[in-house]
Every structure is written in structure tokens, then in C-alpha cells.
């Protein structure tokens, strides 16, 4: 397996365990975790708008950094110095063109999970930079504003982009998926109660639940969403071994990459320069 020390400027980086690397390579997918389940509890504990909607519950994120300089804080927080740093093209996912100006992470105008609806129109294929602020609550409460007599406007592009300044050491950017909670059981009951119900009537029944579901903070049970990696981007992945990884770890990582002949394995600049604590 070839080694390379130079880092491409168009790459992004994710610090994780060797086990997670194995799962990513096997599935060729990257997991988006729900925002109210990430390590920074504050990101999703505040409500937005007049009814204090917890939008973090309906936002899924995949977290990266654009910095090619090694980050000891990230090595420690997410790998205890024994994992890997995945380096991959800045747009690692399969993407889908919606129109001349909009490319989405999702292929369908509308698709449904077990308890949510997701649309390609509100999920741009874009890496969002985290904005580090003094008071995340103040920013999050502005994400929903009244519109018209009974309507609201939700700033979905800004959901999941605010963190307290103390987290700035992470230099984080992230991909996001925004979903809306739906009452699928209500739609099913509608189907059962009517003999000749039309497909569009089922959709209308679902849509009618969206506003009330969000306003009432209807919980969803889905904890993650997995998206496909573009195989051409995965083929050129670069894996950096953590400062305290062993020769056995290198053998495992190289074995995981043996189907990707263009993949690179490099050592951390801190290899041999950190003492492992007992």
C-alpha cells in the first residue's frame, strides 16, 4: 500500500475509529446522526419560534473539518489517538441535480421514512461551515419566524450551524439532511376507513399532519440516515493512522483498503511523539 504525506486541498477530513472505517468501507455509505444525539447537547436543546420547536430532532448531520492540519483535540475526542482520519473529496456523496442552480443529496422530490418525510428540494448538496457564537440559544430561537396570518418560515439552511465559541477548536463543517415528521399511522387509518381512496388523497392526509406535527414537537424514532458515497470518490480515499496506532492497526487498515488500489495510508505527524497514558 503506497504512502503519501501530501494532502490535497480539495479534501475534507473525519476523525473516527478503525471499526467505523470498516463499516463505511463495507457499506459504502456515510451515516448522518440526529442533531439532538451529537456530543454537543446544546445544539438541539433550545427551541425555535413562538412555539419553541426543537428543530434539532428533525436534522441529521455528518461532521467534518476542512483543515488539513492535524487536530490533536479531534484525535483525542473521537479516537483517543488510536483511530484514523479519513480524507476524501469535499463532495463525497452521490448527488442529484434538481434544477440548473440546485444539486441535492437526495434523489427524489419526496420520499418517506418510517416517521418522516424528506425532500430533495430542501436538502442541498453543500458543506456548511459551523458558526461559533457567544449564545447559541439566541441564534436558534430565530430559526422560525411568523409569516402571514397563520404561517411560519423555517430557516432550514441555518439549522444545525450554530455552536458555542468554546467548540471552535473543532473547525467543523457538516453536511445536513432536514426532515419533517409525519403521522403515517393517520394516513394508514385513512386508507383503511375509505374503500376508494386515491393516492393523492393519502398524500394530502400526510401533508395535513406536517404543520401540527412540527408545532407540537412530534418526536421521531429514526436516529440516523445513511447516504451513498460516490464510488469514484471512495476510490481515492486517504487514511491517516492515529498517533498511538500500532503496526497491527496498520495491517488491519491496509487490509480494509485492499479493494481500493488508489487509496493511501499515511502516518500522523505525531507518530512516536505522544506518550500513552496508563
Image (cartoon, rainbow, N blue to C red):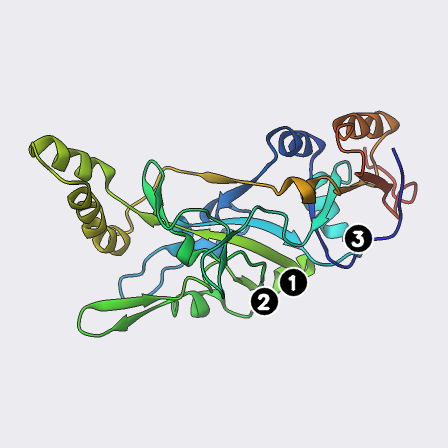
The crowding category of the residue bearing disc 1, from other C-alpha atoms within 10 Å (few below 14, some 14 to 19, many at least 20), is few
Q: Position of residue 24 (x, y in %)?
A: 63, 34
Image: 146 above or below 217: below
Q: Position of residue 22 (x, y in %)?
A: 68, 29
Q: Nearer the viewer, residue 243 or 236?
A: 236
The N terminus sits in image quarter = top right
**Among the 4 quarters of the image, the one containing residue 245:** top right
Q: Which of the two labelled residues, at mark 2 and mark 3, occupies the earlier sequence position?
A: 3
- Residue at image position (55%, 70%) is 134
Which element type, helix, strand or loop, lies under badge 1? helix
**Among the 4 quarters of the image, the one containing residue 220:** top left
Q: In the rendered structure, are the residues bearing label 2 and label 1 in contact, judged by CB atoms less than 8 Å apart?
A: yes
Q: Give the left or right position of residue 4, taking residue 253 as reference.
A: right
Mark drawn on residue 132: 2
Residue located beneath label 3 in the image: 70
Q: Give the left or right position of residue 112, taking residue 251 as reference.
A: left
Q: Which of the two labelled residues, at mark 2 and mark 1, occupies the earlier sequence position?
A: 2
Amino acid at each position: 500500500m503506497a504512502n503519501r504525506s501530501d494532502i490535497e486541498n480539495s479534501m475534507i477530513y473525519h476523525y473516527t475509529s478503525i471499526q467505523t472505517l470498516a463499516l463505511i468501507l463495507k457499506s459504502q455509505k456515510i451515516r448522518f446522526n440526529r442533531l439532538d444525539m451529537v456530543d454537543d447537547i446544546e445544539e438541539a436543546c433550545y427551541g425555535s419560534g413562538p412555539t419553541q420547536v426543537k428543530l434539532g430532532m428533525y436534522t441529521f448531520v455528518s461532521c467534518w473539518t476542512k483543515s488539513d492540519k492535524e487536530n490533536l483535540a479531534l484525535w483525542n475526542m473521537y479516537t483517543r489517538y488510536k483511530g484514523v482520519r479519513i480524507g476524501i473529496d469535499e463532495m463525497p456523496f452521490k448527488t442529484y441535480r434538481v434544477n440548473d442552480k440546485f444539486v441535492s443529496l437526495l434523489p427524489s422530490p419526496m420520499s418517506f421514512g418510517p416517521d418522516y418525510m424528506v425532500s430533495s428540494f430542501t436538502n442541498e448538496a453543500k458543506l456548511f461551515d459551523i458558526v461559533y457564537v457567544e449564545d447559541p440559544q439566541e441564534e436558534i430561537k430565530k430559526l422560525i419566524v411568523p409569516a402571514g396570518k397563520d404561517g411560519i418560515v423555517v430557516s432550514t439552511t441555518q439549522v444545525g450551524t450554530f455552536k458555542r465559541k468554546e467548540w471552535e477548536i473543532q473547525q467543523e463543517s457538516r453536511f445536513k439532511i432536514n426532515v419533517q415528521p409525519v403521522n403515517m399511522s393517520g394516513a394508514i387509518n385513512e386508507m383503511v376507513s375509505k374503500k376508494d381512496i386515491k393516492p393523492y388523497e393519502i398524500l394530502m392526509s400526510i401533508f395535513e399532519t406536517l404543520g401540527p406535527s412540527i408545532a407540537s414537537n412530534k418526536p421521531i424514532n429514526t436516529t440516523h440516515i445513511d447516504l451513498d458515497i460516490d464510488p469514484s470518490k471512495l476510490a481515492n480515499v486517504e487514511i491517516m493512522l492515529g498517533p498511538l496506532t500500532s503496526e497491527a492497526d496498520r495491517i488491519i487498515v491496509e487490509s480494509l483498503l485492499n479493494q481500493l488500489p488508489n487509496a493511501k495510508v499515511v502516518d500522523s505527524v505525531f507518530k512516536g511523539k505522544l506518550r500513552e497514558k496508563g
